[in-house]
Image (cartoon, helix red, strand yellow):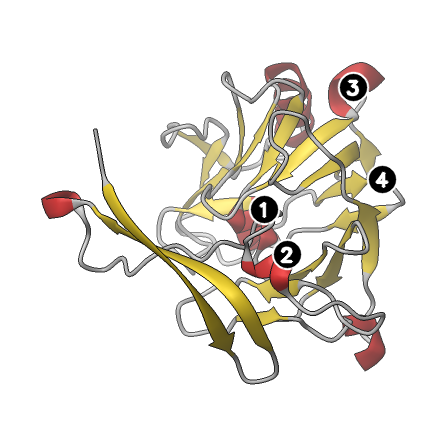
Amino acid sequence: MVFNATAVMDTLALSQVTQENIRAICLEMGSETSESLSGILDLSRDNHSLASGAPSSPDTVAFSCCLPSTVASQGFLSIGAPRPEHSRHLVVYTPLRTHTLLPNMYVVRLTKLDGGGVDVKIPYALHAGNALFMLGTTFTYLMPDTYVILREQFKSQMTEYRVAPSMGDLDTCYNFTGLTRMSMPPITLWFEGWAYIVPGMEQMMYFGRRGDIFSVGCLAFAAASDLPPGITAVIGTLLQERTEVVYDVHGGKMGFSHKQCW
């Protein structure tokens, strides 16, 4: 398929930051273009992206964002953002890694999975590897061997609940309808430098009726059969909700500040 495109350089003025020489590309895609899609904001590590062009100083990061957990909640995207720790927010950082095949993507090292207070016993070579943070993928995908161990650890602590059929890629599902209370083992993802993400129940589980935990819910992790070479996990948007993800591109690190939006 061949597309026609027009590229321009312009200045982008935001509430706190003005960036010059921003590259904008308009593609002519014909009838296949969705009317609800205006364009794609490039926040990658590419030299022409908004992230790379953000003003750099010891007091700012390239950008930070927080995905809200409901449509009624308010998230945010801040370009050239002040460091959250300057506002007394706890931020835990992990180094950004460079992946030869994915040089413009955000890759960090996943070092451990903790399920219900018990370390998931996975051979080091399998689980301590490159994790790719994605804004175009909903669920979190793991190498099959890694996922099986996490799933079995989770299931061993969920025996009191009714099992439900799989939902797409998600095969660890339960029927919580009719209940008035429930609990489930927490899952913690640990990254290099002791950075961590502890997803809430509605980030760890995908519920068939969004916002209703007393419905059918599935563990929002799945086994991936087609991960890019050298990638052991893809971290999806559901798990990132309510956590401010701080992209310190010039400093070579990514940070997590928990429960910053709802």
Q: CA distance from mark 1 to mark 3?
A: 34 Å
Task: Give the label, 1 or 3, closer to the camera.
Answer: 1
Q: Earlier in the sequence, mark 1 or mark 3?
A: 1
Instruction: Write down the residue under mark 4.
Output: 192
User: Where is residue 220 drawn, in percent x and y?
Assistant: 52, 39
Q: Is residue 52 left or right of residue 172?
A: right
The answer to the question of whether label 1 and label 2 lie on touching residues, with beta carbons closer than 8 A, is yes
Q: Amino acid at mark 4?
A: Glu
Q: Amino acid at mark 3?
A: Ile
At numbered mark 3, what does the secondary structure look like: helix, strand or loop? loop
Mark 4, Cα crowd under 10 Å, few <14 / some 14-19 / many 20+, is: some
Q: Earlier in the sequence, mark 1 or mark 2?
A: 1
Residue 46 badge: 1
Could you tell me which residue is drawn at 68 percent across and 73 percent down? 81
Instruction: Write down the residue under mark 2.
Output: 52
Q: Earlier in the sequence, mark 3 or mark 4?
A: 3
User: Where is residue 122 drawn, in percent x and y?
Assistant: 78, 19
Please, is residue 39 above or below residue 97 in the view? below
